[in-house]
Image (spheres, rainbow, N blue to C red):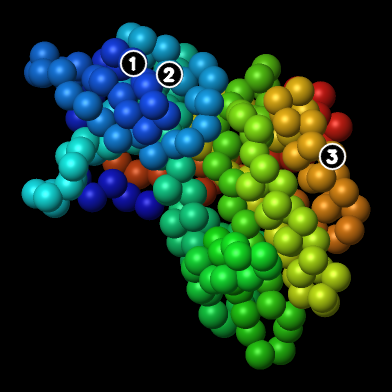
Amino acid sequence: MDFPTPLQRGTLVRRYKRFLSDVVLATGEEITAHVANPGAMLGLSDPGLEVWLSRSTKPDRKLAWSWELARIGGGLVGINTMHPNAIVAEAVADGRIAPLAGYAEIKREVRYGHNSRVDLLLSSPDRPKCYVEVKNVHLKRGDAACFPDAVTARGTKHLHELTDMVREGQRAVMLFLVQREDCSYFAPAEDIDPTYATTLRQAAAAGVELYCYGCRLTLETIRLDKPMPLRLSGDA
């Protein structure tokens, strides 16, 4: 995934109401930027943080600026949770995710389950359909990339629905995408949401496939990187 226009550097003043942030640009101008991230963003929203923003070319958009990246400990972290689906879809189409290769058709945001939409639906005439949910990960604890960073009833619901797809004879995948480069494995954040962690282990036991991939991030692009091991015990 490439950023369509050059990102602009700024300094975070504050994040508030989940989806808003005040930022001082390198020019000295203070602006309000959209935060496409409903999570707690633990460790990623401290005042004074170096942030990178994109500016929309749409003149009628309410907030022209969007918060895309933060710099933590010298490395970049992806903030925008709207990007992972596109990053994974691009990688699947290019055959860069081996467990998901070889499907003839890729569809996004397809209705399934109980009033839900699956992030990716992969299909071919000669094999079961593959339902893929993608979760953005940017919480770091020690060397672990952890999810979730806040209680997620919606995420737990998705695990139940993926389990239902397996029971119906289809294939179901939960793919965690880590939008930072300083983690070596994935673990569920059991202390934040024990229900999600338990349901994740139950889904895996029922046949839902779990994968985690890292990302390579620059100020120009975010690309899927190599797979990362998973430790489902939650011991980060």
Mark 3: few/some/many CA within 10 Å (<14, 14-19, 20+): some
Alpha-carbon neighbours of circle 1 within 10 Å: few (<14), some, or many (≥20)? some
Spot the residue most to the bottom: 125
Q: In this orientation, does residue 181 appear?
A: no
Separation (CA) of disc 3 from disc 2: 28 Å
Task: Check disc 1 and report the residue beneath it.
Answer: 14
Image coordinates of residue 164 in percent, x first then y, are: 79, 66
Where does the image place residue 22, in percent across and percent down from the top left? 26, 20
Circle number at residue 50:
none
Mark 3–mark 2 contact, CB under 8 Å?
no
Q: Which residue is mark 2?
A: 45
Q: Residue at 54% of width from left, 80% of height from top? A: 105
Q: Secondary structure at mark 3?
A: helix
Earlier in the chain: of badge 3 and badge 1, it is 1
Is residue 157 shown to the viewer in this render? yes
For numbered disc 1, what is the local secondary structure? strand
Name the amino acid type tagged 2.
Answer: Ser
Q: Quadrant of residue 121?
A: bottom right
- Work out whether mark 3 precedes mark 2 in sequence or the reverse, and give the earlier one: 2
Looking at the rendered image, the disc whose residue lies closer to the viewer, 2 or 1, is 1
Q: Would residue 6 appear left or right of 134 to someone viewing this image?
A: left
Q: Are marks 2 and 1 in contact (CB under 8 Å)?
A: yes
Which residue is label 3 attached to? 198
Which secondary structure lies at badge 2? loop
Dot 2, crowdedness within 10 Å: few (<14), some or many (≥20)? some
Q: Position of residue 174 (x, y in %)?
A: 69, 54
User: Does 213 appear above or below 71?
Assistant: below
Q: Residue at x 59, y 52 (%)?
A: 134
Marked residue nearer the N-terminal end (2 or 1): 1
Left or right of residue 147, residue 207 in this image: right
